[in-house]
Amino acid sequence: MEYQNTQTTAHTNIAFIKYWGKKDAQLNLPCTDSLSLTLDGYFTTTTSKFISDNEDQIWLNGQRAPVGFFKRTQKFLDLCRQLNHCKQKIQIITTNHVPTAAGLASSASGFAALAGSLNKLFQMHLSRAQLSCLARRGSGSAARSIYGGWVWWQQGSSDQTSLAVPIDEHPQLPICLLSVVFNDQPKKISSTQGMERARTTSPFYSCWPHIVANDLSAMKKAIATADLQQIGQIAENNCLAMHALNWSARPAFSYFTDATWKLINLLQQWRQELQLVAYATVDAGPNVKIITQKNQVQQIQARVQHSFPEAQTTILYPGSGIQ
Ligand code: PMV
């Protein structure tokens, strides 16, 4: 297989209805469905080829991959080798195209691009639905980065039935996100560790599947009617409910910092006093993504920079699925 032909690009995504908890850690089967928007600004491009060396070779942004990245990628290579009854070593060359400190997780675009590239290398001829299942094994949220626009990850009950489906790959509504990065240090508690502690120790975890089911059905209606305010409000509510699981875990933990809270409170004030469309969503870290609309994003960006002169901000629009 020609090296160039394995090249695959995938974009990252942000969950508007969060995935937080696994019912099967080995298969990455989630306890609930989730829903995301794929974004344009940040993507990963990966190529792969068979090599005759004794070790896999993994390159990240022009350098040998650090050990953690190497091990996680190699585990995924082992899975694909096993599926294809193959023992040959592989070279992976992967590049993350990140706007300066966008504070976006690279595992979603990373494993979606890797799954797409290995599909070509092994000539597996997987459909996008099957690719979504494969990408999920690398990182849960990667299942959603196979598609563009609004994507619904159906939890399913097995390796073959837990997959993402597109809701609307080319959203027409004028939505955009403003990513606000206070801190780009790696997180202290990984998402896998955080969701496991919340699932097993928060007394509120049993409510989470009901919260997600309600929020998901309301969110689908809001998307269908292009109601941006509702979309933002449901996403913010769902995000705060997810983080409340962490605050109520035993021992409790939090990804929020003072800056996270300060910005969430400011957004509420701007909604009330200035009638701006501006809602927060936060993942496994302190940084905030503001859900807003195209004709207000510059004003919001200026306000955020005024309140947080040190923060790095990036505007992001809906993006496409894997190519
Ligand atoms: O895909 P993971 O294992 O990195 O988990 C992602 C978890 C959240 O980003 C917090 C929520 C989500 O649905 O993306």
Image (cartoon, rainbow, N blue to C red):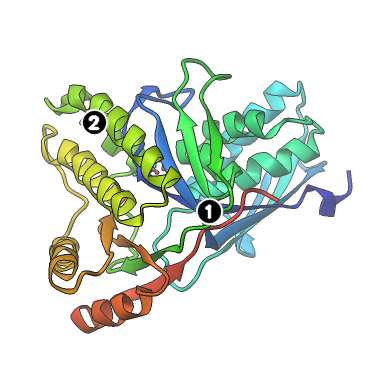
Residue 107 in percent (x, y) is at 49, 47
Q: Mark 2 points at which residue?
A: 211
Residue 34 in percent (x, y) is at 40, 35
Give the residue type that dot 2 points to.
Ile
- On the picture, is 97 further left or further right than 278? right
**Between 136 and 64, the one nearer to me in the picture:** 136
Residue at 47 percent across and 58 percent down: it is: 173
**Up/down of 246 relative to 309, above or below:** above
Residue 121 visible from this viewpoint? yes
* View extreme (right): residue: 2
Residue at 79 percent across and 31 percent down: it is: 125
Q: Name the residue under label 1.
A: 171
- On the picture, is 315 further left or further right than 268? right
**Between 4 and 264, the one nearer to me in the picture:** 264
Residue 63 in percent (x, y) is at 61, 62
Residue 203 in percent (x, y) is at 11, 25
